[in-house]
C-alpha cells in the first residue's frame, strides 16, 4: 500500500467543540484562552527495507491528522456573543488545526522526498536518522508554532495579527517549491510552513 496523508483539510464548526462552563469571559482589555483545539497526528507504517544490498525507506507511511472532540472545548459564554465574535474565534481555532495539519503534511512530504531520492543507506539506522531529523523540524515544532500564533494574536483578539497569520497559513497550503518537484506517489513538494513563517520574519 502506497504512503498516504489523511485529513489535511478539515473545516471546523463551533458545534464540534464541547462546552466548558469553567472559563470566564475576559475582562475588557484582557485576553485568555476561551477555546481549545486538540489535534492528534498519528504516524504508522514507517519501515525500512533491504533491497539490492542497501537499506531504503519503505513506501508504506500513513500520516493521519485527527481533530479530537473529547479534548476540544469552547467556553460556555461564547454562545451568547455576537456573530462577529464567534466568527473570529472559529477562524482562530481553525488556524490551530491548520497549523498542525501543515506541519504533518511537511513531515509527510519530507519522507516522500527521502523515498524518491532513494539514498543508498548502508545500515538500517541511517534512514531512521533522516526521518527523525525531518520530524524535528515539523511535528516536533507543533506546540511552539501554536504558542507563537496565540502570543502574536492575543488568542485571536488581535484581528490584524490574526489576518496576517491566516495569510501565512494560506500561503503554506498553496505555494509549491520552485522549481516544482514531484516526489513519491506523485506528491508535489510544497513550501513548508516554517519557511513561510521565516520568510515573513516570524521566528520559531
Image (cartoon, rainbow, N blue to C red):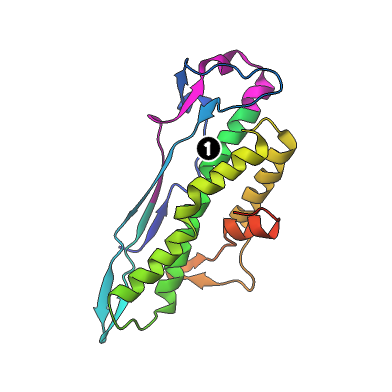
Residue 49 in the image: state x and y as whole percent: 26, 74
State the residue at coordinates (66%, 44%): 166
Residue 99 in the image: state x and y as whole percent: 54, 47
- The residue closer to the viewer here, 186 or 62, is 62
Looking at the image, the residue that sits furthest to the right is 160
- The residue closer to the viewer here, 39 or 176, is 39
Q: Residues within 10 Å of mark 1 (few under 14, many from 20)?
A: few
Please give left or right for residue 54 compared with residue 18 in the image.
Answer: left
Q: Quadrant of residue 198?
A: bottom right
Q: In which quadrant will I find the N terminus?
A: bottom left
State the residue at coordinates (58%, 40%): 95
Q: Quadrant of residue 151?
A: top right
- The residue closer to the viewer here, 170 or 2, is 170
Q: Is residue 204 above or below residue 134?
A: above
Looking at the image, the residue that sits furthest to the top is 80
Q: Is residue 196 above or below residue 111?
A: above
Q: Is 166 contained in the magenta span?
A: no
Number of marks drawn: 1
Q: Quadrant of residue 39?
A: top left
Q: Is residue 177 above or below residue 12?
A: below
Please give left or right for residue 123 compared with residue 118 in the image.
Answer: left
Q: Which residues are magenta?
A: 64-87
Q: In which quadrant will I find the C terminus?
A: bottom right
Q: Secondary structure at mark 1?
A: loop
According to the image, label 1 marks what residue? 11
Q: Is 68 contained in the magenta span?
A: yes
Residue 194 in the image: state x and y as whole percent: 58, 57
Residue 20 in the image: state x and y as whole percent: 46, 19
State the residue at coordinates (39%, 58%): 4
Amino acid at each position: 500500500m502506497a504512503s498516504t496523508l489523511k485529513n489535511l483539510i478539515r473545516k471546523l464548526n463551533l458545534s464540534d467543540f464541547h462546552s466548558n462552563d469553567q472559563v470566564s469571559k475576559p475582562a475588557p482589555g484582557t485576553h485568555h484562552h476561551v477555546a481549545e483545539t486538540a489535534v492528534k497526528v498519528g504516524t504508522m507504517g514507517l519501515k525500512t527495507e533491504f533491497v539490492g544490498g542497501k537499506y531504503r525507506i519503505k513506501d508504506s507511511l500513513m500520516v493521519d491528522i485527527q481533530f479530537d472532540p473529547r479534548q476540544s472545548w469552547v467556553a460556555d459564554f461564547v454562545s451568547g456573543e455576537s456573530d462577529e465574535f464567534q466568527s473570529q474565534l472559529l477562524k482562530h481555532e481553525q488556524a490551530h488545526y491548520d497549523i498542525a495539519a501543515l506541519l504533518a503534511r511537511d513531515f509527510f512530504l519530507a519522507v516522500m522526498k527521502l523515498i524518491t531520492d532513494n539514498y543508498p543507506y548502508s545500515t538500517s539506522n541511517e534512514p531512521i536518522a533522516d526521518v527523525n531529523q525531518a520530524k524535528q523540524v515539523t511535528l516536533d515544532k507543533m506546540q511552539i508554532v501554536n504558542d507563537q500564533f496565540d502570543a502574536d494574536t492575543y488568542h485571536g483578539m488581535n484581528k490584524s495579527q490574526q489576518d496576517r497569520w491566516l495569510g501565512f497559513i494560506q500561503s503554506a497550503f498553496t505555494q509549491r517549491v520552485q522549481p516544482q518537484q514531484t516526489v513519491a506517489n506523485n506528491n508535489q513538494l510544497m513550501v513548508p510552513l516554517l519557511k513561510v513563517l521565516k520568510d515573513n520574519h516570524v521566528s520559531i
